[in-house]
Amino acid sequence: MDFNKIVPVTGLFLVMLLVGLAFTGYAQTNTAEKQGVASFAEDTKEEPRLISVSGTAKKTMAPDTAEIYLSVETLDKSASKSQNQNAVISEKVRKALKDSGIADKDIQTTSYNLYQEYEWNQSTLKSEVKGYKTVNSIKVIVRNLSNVGTTIDVAVGVGANSVSGVSFTLSDEKQAQLANEALQQAAANASLKAQNIAKGLGIALGKVQTASESSSYYPPTPYYRSYDLAAGATAESAKTSITPGDIEVNASVSVTYEIV
């Protein structure tokens, strides 16, 4: 074997290898430099110019539903007698309400309680058991508001002896309608504000970048009245007349526009 021929070939191979490695390093360095330039260009890109506005709206509507909260309360030395008396009167109230046109599904029991009631004895300076009190609380939904007063009087006339309040609201469909109208009006108000600001500043509006909303629902103040049958409140003496206020919905829409 001629070693003088092998040595030059090996030397040539090492030279080519070193040249290849150097070229690869240069290519990687050059690529990294290019990537670094691109990254720097992206980092220094100008942020979009924006303008933010808020629009508001208030819509009102007359309520179309009333909720009457009433109770039948009975008191007796015997717990069972108190319960039985309450059951009889409560059934009379339900029947009278249904006979007056209230649907069975709109007469709902909200709570039922039986407990000992105490009173203060000034002579002995002690609380003494007065008896067992049964309270059957009922919610009555009235969908014809002209019948609210009559419905209360019907219930009181057959034995309901506590009316804790009347609240007014809208049906789900009317609530959705009122809220949608308020949001649309608030959005239009925000758009008009943005256009007026842009005109005053001599700029042009671009696309909407962000939008958010909020709304609030205000029913009229509940009407409260308590009946005390022992004091002489009867169906004849309690001609109840109730006039509700309007439902109010406030909406706000915040919008951010791009300036072009």
Image (spheres, rainbow, N blue to C red):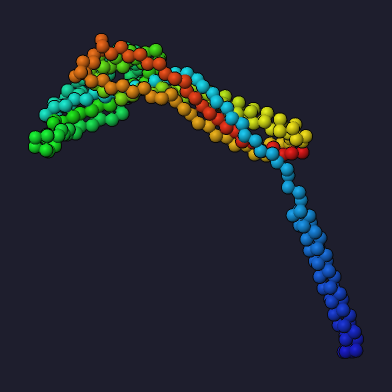
Q: Along the line of sight, which residue is nearer the eye, 204 or 145?
A: 204
The answer to whether residue 234 is above or below residue 21 is above
Q: Residue at x 83, y 65 (%)?
A: 30
Q: How many marks?
A: 0
Q: Quadrant of residue 256?
A: top right
The answer to whether residue 139 is above or below residue 35 is above
Q: Position of residue 123 (x, y in %)?
A: 9, 35
Q: Along the line of sight, which residue is nearer the eye, 94 or 76?
A: 76
Q: Position of residue 126 (x, y in %)?
A: 12, 38
Q: Along the line of sight, which residue is nearer the eye, 146 or 110?
A: 146
Instruction: Locate the C terminus by quadrant.
Output: top right
Q: Residue at x 20, y 28 (%)?
A: 134
Q: Position of residue 109 (x, y in %)?
A: 30, 26
In the image, taking residue 1 as reference, residue 82 lies left or right, namely: left
In the image, taking residue 73 as reference, residue 253 lies left or right, namely: right
Q: Position of residue 148 (x, y in %)?
A: 36, 16
Q: Is residue 116 visible?
A: yes
